[in-house]
Structures are given as structure tokens and as C-alpha cells.
Image (cartoon, rainbow, N blue to C red):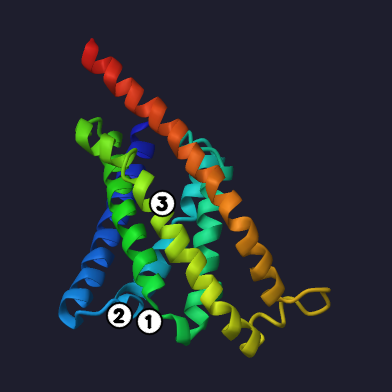
Amino acid sequence: MPQLSKLYLVTYNSLQALGWAFALSRILSSFVTTKSVNGAYSAAGELICFLQKVAFLEVVHGAIGLVPSGVVHPLLQWGGRIHFLLAVVHLIDEVQELPSVFITFFVWTLTEVIRYLHYTLNCIQSCPSWITYLRYTVFIVLYPIGVAPGEMWLMYQALPFVKKKHLHEDLFDGLPFSYYNFLQVLLLCYPFLWLKLYLHMFKQRQSKLGKHHEKKKM
């Protein structure tokens, strides 16, 4: 990897790791201080929205071959999160204090701290095996929690407010269906879209952890 590309990736991933770590600390601090899960969005919502917008760069990274991730899987994850954040949670005050937001944000922040730390240390070829193990293991538990009682449950709870507020009515003007209908269909498709990403992570786990076992044997 060229030195300039390496320096860029180390900088990008380390800043993302710090940003998500700060968001996680804000969420946990709010929980400890208030003894409630209702303050997750007010504590870290805007920061998480910003970090997730910036993460579109990872789709670009895959598209131009800077990293070997490709485009499809990064785009699916980025699009799902951006829709959840900006199209639903950010626009509906009534859902921002629900436990589902806390669950989603906690899972995202913890996952991303580990992921970006792993990427950063890999770029400088100094990643401990236990970080790699965490990167390709914690998702087994965290991903289902983040999706079912987190993202999906929140969007389901948002449906009455979407209908009442005629959310995104201008974007769907002239179409034979509304955003409310779109969200209903999305909720039906969500488990299948998520399963694609989940199974992809298992393939990565087998590949990455398998390589580490081979290195240890050598």
C-alpha cells in the first residue's frame, strides 16, 4: 500500500474510532447520571449522525479499490443506518427517547470502536490477535440485538407518527405509495437484508480468524 494511502487510512480510521468512543462515553455517562435509557439520542445523536454521514467515504474507499471491501456491503450498511437516523429518528421527536434508540446506539458505538481500532492497527501492521478476535466475534451477539429490539422495533414504533405527520410526503408525491407504505415494506424486507450482511460477516470471520490460526501454527 502506498505511504500516502496508508497515512490517510490510519488517520480516517483512528478519528472514527475516537469519535465512536466519545459517543459511547456520552451514552454511558447519560445512562449512569440519569439512571435511564431515555437520553441516548440527546447525549450522542447529533455526533452519531455526523459520524455516519462521514462513513460514506467507506463506500468510496471500496469503489476506488483503496480497501478490498467492495461497494455492495458497505453501501447496504451505510444506507440502512442513514435511513434509520436521518429519515426516521432525527425527524420524529416522539421516538428519540425510546429504549430502542439506546439499544441501537449502544450496539453501534461498541461495534464501531472495535472495528475502527482493528482497521487502524491493521494499517500499521500492529494489531493484537485479541482485537482481531473481538472484531470478528462480538458481532455474533451484538448484530441481532441491534437489529431486532433496536432498529426494527424503533421503526415499527415510528409508524403511527410517520402516518400522522405525513413524513416525506413531498418525496413520494406522484407515486402510488407513501413513505408510510415504504417503511412497512422495508420492515418486511429488513430481516433478509440484514441476514445477507450477517452471513457475510461469518464468511469474513472464517477467513480472518483462520489466517490467524495458521500464523500461530507457523
Q: Amino acid at mark 2?
A: Gly
Q: Quadrant of residue 36?
A: bottom left
Furthest toward the top, the residue is 218
Residue 213 shows in the view:
yes
- Which of the 4 quarters of the picture holds residue 33? bottom left
Can residue 1 be seen at all in this image of the molecule? no
Q: Is residue 135 above or below residue 182?
A: above
Whole-Å distance between the Cαs marked 3 and 1?
21 Å
Q: Position of residue 31 (x, y in %)?
A: 22, 75
Q: CA distance from mark 2 to mark 3?
A: 22 Å
Q: Which amino acid is tagged 1? A: Glu
Q: Which mark is residue 143?
A: 3
Give the vertical position of 82 relative to 170 (above or below): above
Residue at the location (20% across, 82% down)? 34
Measured Cα–Cα span from mark 1 to mark 2: 6 Å
Q: Which residue is mark 2?
A: 39
Q: Residue at x 32, y 75 (%)?
A: 40
Please, what secondary structure does the residue beneath circle 2 have? loop
Q: Which mark is residue 97?
A: 1
Circles 1 and 2: CB distance less than 8 Å?
yes
Near mark 1 (Cα within 10 A), the count class, few <14, some 14-19 or many ≥20, is: some
**If you read the primary sequence from the N terminus, does the residue marked by circle 2 or circle 3 appear first?**
2
Quarter of the image where the N terminus is located: top left
C-beta proximity under 8 Å, tags 3 and 1: no
What secondary structure is found at the residue carrying circle 3? helix
Name which residue lies at 56% across and 43% down. Answer: 196
Task: Answer left or right for 69 relative to 50.
Answer: right
Q: Secondary structure at mark 1?
A: loop
